[in-house]
Amino acid sequence: MASLKALKVRINSVKSTQKITKAMKMVAAAKLRRAQEAAQNGRPYAERLEAVMASLAGRVGGTGASPLLAGTGKDQVQLLVVATSERGLAGAFNTNIVRAARRKADELVAQGKTVKFYIAGKKGRVLRRFFPNAILADHEMGQIKSVAFDDARAIADDLIARYGRGEFDVAHLFYAKFVSALVQEPVGQQLIPVPVPPQPVKTAASADAVVEYEPSEEAILDDLLPRNVAVQIFRALLENAASEQGSRMNAMDNATRNAGDMINRLSIQYNRTRQAAITTELVEIISGAEAL
């Protein structure tokens, strides 16, 4: 009978866990809709700003350009900005981002570079296990309930200030791009200095196009460079928010179904144990009656 009681307790415990995972799945699904819309709405602005930056940088060139564009002239100290979530129970969401950052770090170390980490998100602190002496900063994100541009600008301002003090030469940003509720793709992109894609070959149609800037291209570029850093971080945070909820929804759905399967197996085991106990009692009763 003790075995029956233990099985009953376990079944009730799994049922309680199943209720929790089911509720968490529904909450994640509700949050996913809003986060997905925010991420998708933020992409066109970030992509268009990158195109404007490329156009202006092509006009200005490297001579006399801001260090955010021209760089420091060296690439020895590489900073990896790792954006993760504050909470777990989101499947492989955080693990995939950290794994991508570690892979990049190993490549840079193999090239003889000095690697440092800038952690944005509690779950990124797992990097301390692998690189205990390489954590440059741990930006607190726990107070953020809904991602806002000011949150990204605070990180960007801190990074730009550290860049100006010479704490690193190149910065890379790691986050998870939201593809769908089932797919979240880890992404690593250069953040500082701002990468300039190769200029497209001018055609006859584009050769006649004349664009005049007021004020000068240099002045506009100097103003847009810090904003571009903040915008790219903001896009990463929005993509992360949507990816986190999508991954959590899937993880909780799998946990709910696994709990259901476990309940079925435990119920079968409980019924078999109970039937065996009843059969044993009947045999003992019958044996006792025959003995009389």
Image: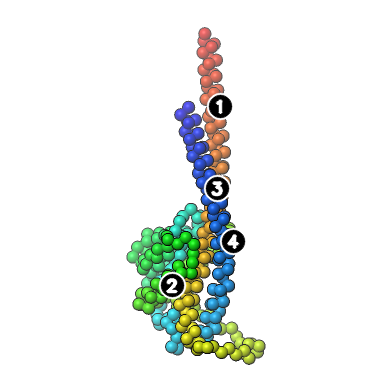
Give, as a three-letter code, the residue at label 2. Answer: Ala
* 176 shown above or below 208: above
For the residues marked 3 and 4, what is the alpha-carbon distance in whole angstroms? 20 Å
Which residue is outermost to the top? Answer: 292
In this view, the mark in front (4 or 2):
2
Question: Mark 1 near mark 4, Cβ–Cβ under 8 Å?
Answer: no
The label on residue 22 is: 3
Q: CA distance from mark 3 to mark 1?
A: 32 Å
The residue indicated by pointer 1 is 275
The x and y percentages for residue 197 are: 53, 80
Q: In this rendering, does residue 106 appear at all?
A: no
In terms of sequence position, does the residue under pointer 1 or pointer 4 come before the other? 4
Residue at 57% over, 38% down: 264
Mark 1 vs mark 2: which is more N-terminal?
A: 2
Query: Which tag, 3 or 4, sits closer to the chain's start?
Result: 3
Pick the front one: 35 or 75: 35
Query: For the residue labelled by badge 2, is the local secondary structure a helix, a strand or a loop?
Result: helix
Amino acid beneath label 3 = Lys
Disc nearest the viewer among 1 and 4? 4
Q: For the residue carrying disc 2, how many other residues have a C-alpha within 10 Å: few (<14), some (14-19), or many (20+)?
A: many
Image location (x, y in percent) of residue 282: 55, 19
At which x and y percent is residue 190?
Answer: 47, 74
What is the distance, in whole Å, between disc 4 and disc 2 at their CAs?
27 Å
**Category of crowding for the residue at label 1, using alpha-carbon neighbours closer than 10 angstroms: few (below 14), some (14–19), many (at least 20):** few
**Three-letter residue code for mark 4:** Ser
User: Does label 3 or label 1 sit earlier along the sequence?
Assistant: 3
Residue 113, percent from left and from top: 39, 73
- Marks 1 and 2 sit apart, C-alpha to C-alpha, by 66 Å
Numbered disc in front, either 3 or 1 = 3
Question: Residue 180 — which label?
Answer: 4
Query: Which residue occupies 54% across, 23% down?
Result: 278
In the rendered structure, find residue 156 and report the number of the disc placed on it.
2
